[in-house]
Amino acid sequence: MNKLIYLSFIGAILFLSSCSSSMSPIQVNNTLPSLTKSKYISQSEIETSNCKYLTKNRSYTAPIGLFAKDDLRNGARGIDEWVTLDGGNAYILRNYRWVNVGDEATQLHLEFDTLLCE
């Protein structure tokens, strides 16, 4: 009986860790802006926006979450903190990637610019 419980527990952990691996670019693009308090400016919008760059090429490694959306939520908090510290109110997401950490986990790395928009 103990073996069955142990195997079920291991199976549940493997299932949950496989769920958190990553998201598609469309999923990230649709989800991340809804999780930040700062205004999201797409790279195509920057030409027509009334924004000034404050910091370019900022990077942030989000704490690992249980699921990919938790990773994005943690990343959104980091983006908002940097935007505030830089004195801005908006950001441009330049790049993101999930990096393998150990055998089972992934961690979200974000690259972005902070902006001040009117």
Image (spheres, grey):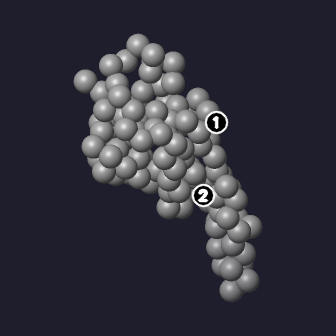
Mark 2: amino acid? Gln
Mark 1: amino acid? Ser
Above-or-below relation of 107 to 84: below
Circles 1, 2 touching at the beta carbon (< 8 Å)? no
Q: Name the residue under label 1.
A: 24
Q: Which residue lies furthest to the bottom in this view?
A: 2
Q: Position of residue 45 (x, y in %)?
A: 45, 18
Tell which tag, 1 or 2, sits nearer the viewer: 2
| Residue at 52% in and 50% down | 59
> How would you rate the neighbour count of disc 1 (Cα within 10 Å): few for under 14, some for 14-19, many for 20 or more?
few
Q: Where is residue 2 in the image (x, y as percent from the top left)?
A: 68, 86
Using the image as rendered, state which of residue 5 and residue 94 is in the foreground. 94
- Label whose residue precedes the other's in the sequence (1 or 2): 1
| Residue at 60% in and 57% down | 107
Quarter of the image containing the N terminus?
A: bottom right
* Element type where label 2 sits in the image: strand
Q: Find the distance from the CA under tag 1 to the CA under tag 2.
A: 15 Å
Q: Name the residue under label 2.
A: 107
Above-or-below relation of 60 to 54: below
Residue 101 left/right relative to 29: right
